[in-house]
Amino acid sequence: MEANGLPEGIRSSSLYSEDLAPIPISKRTWTKWNLAALWVGMAVCIPTYLLASYMMRAGLSWQAALTIIGLANLVITIPMVLNGHAGVKYGIPFPVQGRAAFGTQGIHIPSMVRAIVACGWFGVNAWIGGLALYSIWNAATGAVGDPGLGVGKFVAFGLFWLVQIHFVWKGTESIRWLENWSAPILILIGVVLIGWGAKNAGGFMNALEQGKQLQQGTVKVLPYADAPGRTLGLSPLLKPDGTPKATHFRLVHPIQREAQASGEWTPIAERMTTVHIGMEEFVQVQFKDAEGHESTKLDVKPTTSTEGTNIFWQYLMWFTAMVGFWATMSISISDITRYAKTQKDQLAGQFIGLPGTMLFYSFVSIFVTSAAVVAFKDVLIAEDAPWDPVSLVSKFKSPGVVIFAQIAMLIATLSTNIAANVIAPANAFSNLFPKKISFRVGGVIAGVIGIVICPWWLMDEISGILIFVSGLLGPVLGILLCDYFVVRKRTLAIKDLFDVNGPHKGVSIPALTALVAGVLVALIGFWVKPLEVLYQLSWFSGFAVAFGVYWGSMRMERR
């Protein structure tokens, strides 16, 4: 052994670098509160804010949405803690830990997929942060924002990108400082938002009561209408006294849209107004109130009612989606837990930080959006409710409020992006060429890729692709947990992990086989309709199959 506790001769290996080397316990500075703060910083982001809204818009109650979010994040924290065990015990990052299962070369497959996903999210979040910075500048100076891709937006994006690279260049201690500093601020912002909602909705319980209105769509095709054709049920939002906020509605037919004309306004007298549209397939409905506020135009398409959908299956689908939300972090969590002092620190820190924050900010989202039904007169229909923070901020006219809100968004985006989308790709790129690419350089590479993908043009498309790929990473976690806990009984030989010609050299065929099997099972339902359940539950199906195949393959190999 060398003086610093490393195995003899490990430094000369081409797989070794100071950034990938095991961190001695004496140099680990992260406590359970640091890890909890890290999770607060990562979990408070726009996607978290939107989670509950997606479920409520699909018809779930806010209680059901919160229950699913809470349970799903408790479930994903378990494999998160299990996979973080090796990071704490040996002080090694994910690319080094994964060499045991995938091989010294094979680990590049899952680590680079993880890295590319993170780089994509880095670019998307960097653009969102730049837009927040741009909004702050406009609010402070009174300038009129450019609705297109103006120079100002790119300047703001560049500045925000540089701020993030500053923390990357300073290293993990600066990241720890950022998360410790931002966590209490983000929690305080959540409390302020709840206070605003309670004040403007006439009380805490009244705000929650309004949330029931957001569970149903405004326009519904009535299935049992007597007249031939289709009859619509129109249900705009209600005031606290039970009367509709909208006073009139009108139908816009395709011929009228082509002529840029609209139908006549019809008064609304009841909570639900029925209107017969005959055999017309594509119609739009719009609402307005007595003060002239007009809603967006809602498309009425030739669809049938979704009533009767199995509620248990609907809950299970959302549960799977929520578990997959942190799929990428679960495979690379040892990148972070290697800085923890003890297993108790990483256990407590993750369970305190992840489920609690996700639950709290999802509740903030539900509460504030529900309160907006009362607080904003121009919100006439559920579809126009400010479900996301950007829409919420746009409702305020005060420059001070806008600046405060955008600063909050900046802090949330910065803390999420640095922790979730920089550390993993930095280590993955460093693992490609350990002697040439440091953690710093790897982080900069991640940042450059975030620019190259041009998030300002392809943000929606990129997000969809990244979510799709993230759902296929369950097999990687299955292989890692099976290898560490079942095959190797939580015992790794550090010297072998850095030995080019050792027992982990090259590519592990059992791991590669299990990975392919897990991904194929998760994907097959995408093409084969009867097996669609495997795709819909891709994280679980991929995880289980990869775990089983790897375990069986390793048993056969060791006989």
Image (tube, rainbow, N blue to C red):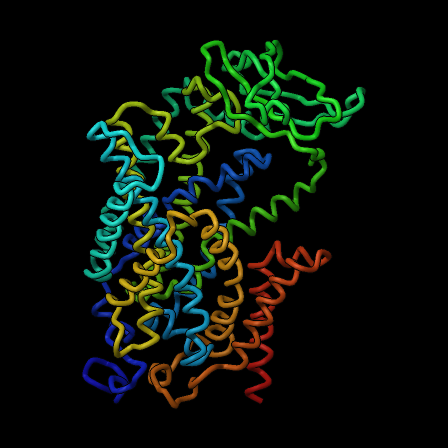
Q: Would you say 343 lies left or right of 262 here? A: left
Image point (38%, 62%), residue name: 333
Position of 401 relative to 2 (above/below) = above
Q: Where's residue 544, x and y in %?
A: 59, 65
Q: Is residue 221 left or right of residue 501?
A: right
* Residue 253 on image: x %, y %: 63, 24
Picture quadrant where residue 24 is located: bottom left
Q: Is residue 506 left or right of residue 261?
A: left
Which is nearer the eye, 267 or 424?
267
Residue 136: name its quadrant: top left
Residue found at x 22% / y 53%? 162
Q: Is residue 297 above or below residue 57?
A: above
In this view of the protein, which residue sits in the foreground, 403 or 82? 403
Residue at (61% x, 62% y) in the render: 523
Image quadrant of residue 524?
A: bottom right
- Residue 185 point in image, percent of width and height: 26, 40
Residue 249 at least partly seen: yes
Q: Residue furthest front?
A: 259
Image side of residue 94 versus residue 469, left or right: left
Residue at image coords 37%, 44% = 45
For this rendering, which residue is in front, 320 or 451? 451
Query: Across the whole image, how many numbered discs are drawn on residues?
Result: 0
Q: Out of 144 and 439, give the one closest to the viewer.
A: 144
Where is residue 529 shown, x and y percent of the image? 71, 56
What quarter of the picture does the C terminus occupy?
bottom right
Which quadrant: the N terminus? bottom left
Is 447 placed above or below 205 here? Answer: below
Residue 353 appears anywhere in the view: no
Tell me if residue 235 comes above or below residue 27 in the rendering.
Answer: above
